[in-house]
Amino acid sequence: MQQRILLITGWGGGTKLLNSLKQALQQQGDQVELINIFNAFDEQILQQHVELAKQFDIILGWSLGGQLAALVVDQIEQQYAERKVLITLASNPCFVANDSWQTAMAQHTFQQFKQSFEQDAITTLKKFGYMVCQGVESTKADFIILQSLIQPQQIQLLKQGLILLEQLNVADILKKYQGKQYHLLAQQDALVSCKVIDNLQNLNAKFLDVDLIASSHGFPIIHAEETSDKIFQYLKKIKQTS
């Protein structure tokens, strides 16, 4: 049976970055809609996305998109008592470290990044793009691919995205979520440590699965087919056990 997947991209680059993943998922026979990040701290905007996501079976997000996906499935469960399959790619429930979640980017590192963005957004986005590809032998080649796909973004949306990255912590949502959830992380990720897997497992959520892929933070862009295969192996597994 064809499933409907809502795919949410990450911060900074636009939807084109995940076109290859969208196509790979569609080749497996599913229907996929790809959307950009959004300001989830605006209640009206969040509700619009909840209404959209309600029409899908699987809510899938990369990086910040994974945190947004978690917010959306939580709202759907609360408002409609429906449980969607949640899938996150290279996504840390809490991107900036705090006392309750320390496997994340240091506060001072994030503040430096934010200041740098205020002073020179274009150069900072370029540096961020390089970090997305960092950690593997093919970093330079991967960065060229990434650069060719990046779309100009509204500064206001990027600023809102930084506030979300700084303040969002969806760990409690994942811990309490009664739906099925799958979190795929990268072994050589320069932005989200693969050690986050331990944190996720420690949440002891009822239907939580985690997995690792040998790649950088940008694996959904660079290794779209392998990512798609991992997703479908998971979906096949939960179909067999349900």
Image: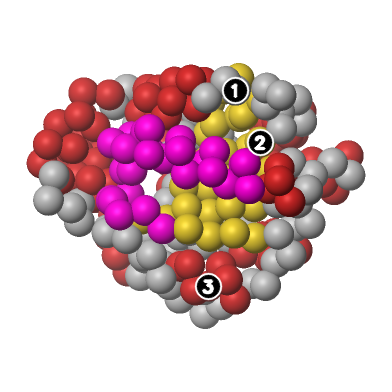
| Position above or below: 123 against 135 | above
Question: Residue 19 location in percent, x, y?
Answer: 40, 22
Mark closer to the observer (3, 1): 1
User: Do the residues under discs 3 and 1 have CB atoms within 8 angstroms?
Assistant: no
Q: Residues within 10 Å of mark 3 (few under 14, many from 20)?
A: some
Q: Mark 2 and mark 1: span between their CA atoms?
A: 10 Å
Q: Which circle's residue, 2 or 3, is located before the other in the chain?
A: 2
Q: Mark 3 and mark 1: span between their CA atoms?
A: 31 Å
Q: Is residue 235 magenta?
A: yes
User: Do the residues under discs 2 and 3 have CB atoms within 8 angstroms?
Assistant: no
Going by the numbered disc 1, the residue's amino acid type is: Asp
Q: Is residue 53 magenta?
A: no
Residue topped by disc 1 = 30
User: Do the residues under discs 2 and 1 have CB atoms within 8 angstroms?
Assistant: yes
At 85% from the left and 48% from the top, the residue drawn is 78
At 73% from the left and 51% from the top, the residue drawn is 241
Q: Nearer the viewer, residue 204 or 144?
A: 204
Q: Nearer the viewer, residue 202 or 106?
A: 202
Disc sitting over residue 14 in the figure: none
Q: Magenta-highlighted stretch: main secondary structure? A: helix
Range of residues picked out in magenta: 212-237
| Position above or below: 152 against 38 | above
Question: Residue 205 location in percent, x, y?
Answer: 70, 66
Q: Mark 2 and mark 3: span between their CA atoms?
A: 23 Å
Helix, strand or loop at mark 3: helix
Disc sitting over residue 58 in the figure: 2
At 37% from the left and 24% from the top, the residue drawn is 20
Q: Which circle's residue, 3 or 1, is located before the other in the chain?
A: 1
